[in-house]
Amino acid sequence: ELHQPQKILDRAQAARGAQQYATRCLVCHGAALEGNTLAPPLTGRFIADWAGMNLGDLFDNIALTMPLYRPGSVERSVNADILAYILKVNAYPAGPRELSAEPEALKAIRFDAWPIGGGASNASSGAGPR
């Protein structure tokens, strides 16, 4: 049985994340987060692959491995904004506060699959957690 996901992102933070995504991530992950030969999609199968983990795991993966040309070079606050944008595209609901840029705080938030609208139902393949 599906349950309502936690309200884990702030709309203003996701808007900042969209701008950062366009600058730092779009070339590899695509305008619609669809991925390409260089990088996996950030919608669809991506959600199922991370389900059951926590946002701290995903945040750490982004912080340590992105961007491809200079891993680990993006500020944590910018990574948090980008993560908020990815969640928004995947139809996660907005909440009362911004995502933390501290991995320990994010480890308390479970990353549940939530197959509703948005990008979450558009793609069907992709790479798992790295």
Image: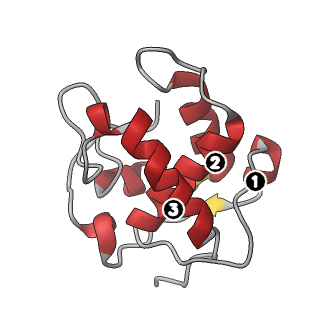
Residue position marked by numbered label 2 in the rendering? 80
Decide which of 113, 74 is in the foreground and name it.
74
Q: Quadrant of residue 44?
A: bottom left
In the picture, measured across the screen, residue 105 lies left or right of residue 63, that is right
The kind of residue tagged 3 is Ala
In the picture, measured across the screen, residue 82 lies left or right of residue 80, that is left
Mark positioned earlier in the residue sequence (1 or 3): 3
In the picture, measured across the screen, residue 126 lies left or right of residue 111, that is left
How many numbered marks does the figure carry? 3
Residue name at image x 60 percent, y 67 percent = 12
Residue name at image x 81 percent, y 52 percent = 105
The kind of residue tagged 2 is Ala
Residue 121 position, x and y percent, is 26, 68
Decide which of 105, 94 is in the foreground and name it.
94
Distance Cα–Cα, label 1 vs label 2: 7 Å
Local packing at callout 1 (Cα closer than 10 Å; few below 14, some 14-19, many 20+) is some
Local packing at callout 3 (Cα closer than 10 Å; few below 14, some 14-19, many 20+) is some
Residue 50 position, x and y percent, is 48, 50
Distance Cα–Cα, label 3 vs label 2: 12 Å
Mark seen at residue 100: 1
From the image, state whether disc 3 or disc 2 is nearer to you: 3
Q: Are circles 1 and 2 on residues that touch, CB within 8 Å?
A: yes
Distance Cα–Cα, label 1 vs label 3: 15 Å
Local packing at callout 2 (Cα closer than 10 Å; few below 14, some 14-19, many 20+) is many
Picture layout, residue 52 above or below residue 79: below
Picture layout, residue 46 above or below residue 63: below
Residue 84 position, x and y percent, is 56, 58
Disc 3 element: helix
Disc 2 element: helix
Mark positioned earlier in the residue sequence (1 or 2): 2
Decide which of 125, 101 is in the foreground and name it.
101
Residue position marked by numbered label 3 in the rendering? 15
